[in-house]
Amino acid sequence: YMAKNLAFWNVRYLFLFPSYDNVRNELNKKYTFEMVDDKSGSRFYVGKDPSSYFLKDHRNALIMGAGSPGVEIEFPYLVYDQRTNILDYSLKELEQYKLIYLCEPEIHNQVEKEKVENRIKKLVNKGITVMIEPGAPKAYSLFNVAVSEMKLENSPVIKQKKDSLFDNMLTNIKVDQNINYSRVLFGLDQVYYELLQNNGRLENDIIGTKRVGNGEVTFIGMHLSQYLRAVYARNWGAPNEESGYPGCTDQVKTLFEDIFAAYGVNKNFWPDPFPVQ
């Protein structure tokens, strides 16, 4: 995430403490930063690549909503510009993306709900993938997909259904019960993942699609993003040790990455110089 921001700021000089060398290492996956001085106990690096006043952004996925800040840190290939409502964007702006991810969208009244649904329907009809991770149950439900908060019970497992759209080798993810609640979904037309509890006796839908217009909208339940490291740290504070993060955080990140891959999200976030004649 830090390397991505430095790249988009067109930085060509770095002054880093040795503990931040991993930032330089990430940047050197795209650029060439060489150390020219380390006498002060810190390290001064100079980029050997030519600078450019204009940069070309190849990313094709946009994230917005109250839950976005932590997710965009975890996945730097998602575009985020702090606008939280899909109505804050023009249709022309939105049409340049292949996927639009509404992470905990806040809908304040029925009129706004209808406008948001109409905007999403237009995007779906143009072949753009829209993914919604609903917020708290008190919020307005989009496309009649209801959300209910549920306290986790014994042996919670995220289980992939046989006809899942997503190519994920992790067919079962054991859920960390230290986060003791989940958001389950009702009203989906197609279900790809369920939350199983009490050794499979309790089943609830958590990932699937709802038919909208000429296509469908993908819904992500369970407040699934809360298990990601960056989101967890933002919500609860960074733990003192790696073991302090949810035990399923790596598997959940892999699941998100598989979902993005299935929808053709470009994961190369490095900008290129914009050709100027």
Image (spheres, grey):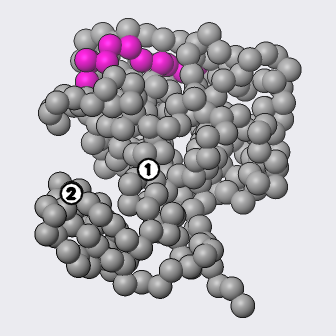
Q: Amino acid at mark 1?
A: Phe
| Callout 1: SS | loop
Q: Residue at x 51, y 63 (%)?
A: 9
Residue at the disc numbered 1? 75
Assess whether mark 2 and mark 1 are in contact (beta carbons under 8 angstroms).
no
- Residue 204 placed where, x, y %? 45, 19
Report how far apart the C-alphas of labels 1 and 2 lie in the structure.
25 Å
Q: Is 188 on the left-hand or right-hand side of 198?
A: right
Q: Nearer the viewer, residue 227 or 194?
A: 227
Q: Residue at x 58, y 13 (%)?
A: 137
Report which quarter residue 155 is drawn in.
top left
Q: Amino acid at mark 2?
A: Phe
Q: Nearer the viewer, residue 105 or 23?
A: 23
Q: Nearer the viewer, mark 1 or mark 2?
A: 2
**Residue 147 to residue 209: above or below:** above
**Residue 257 to residue 15: above or below:** above
Label of residue 17 in the image: 2
- Residue 208 placed where, x, y %? 55, 34
| Callout 2: SS | loop
Q: Nearer the viewer, residue 110 or 264?
A: 110
Image quarter hosting the C terminus: bottom right
Q: Is 150 on the left-hand or right-hand side of 265?
A: left
Q: Which residues are magenta?
A: 176-186
Report which quarter residue 193 is drawn in.
top left
Is any atom of residue 18 visible in this view?
yes
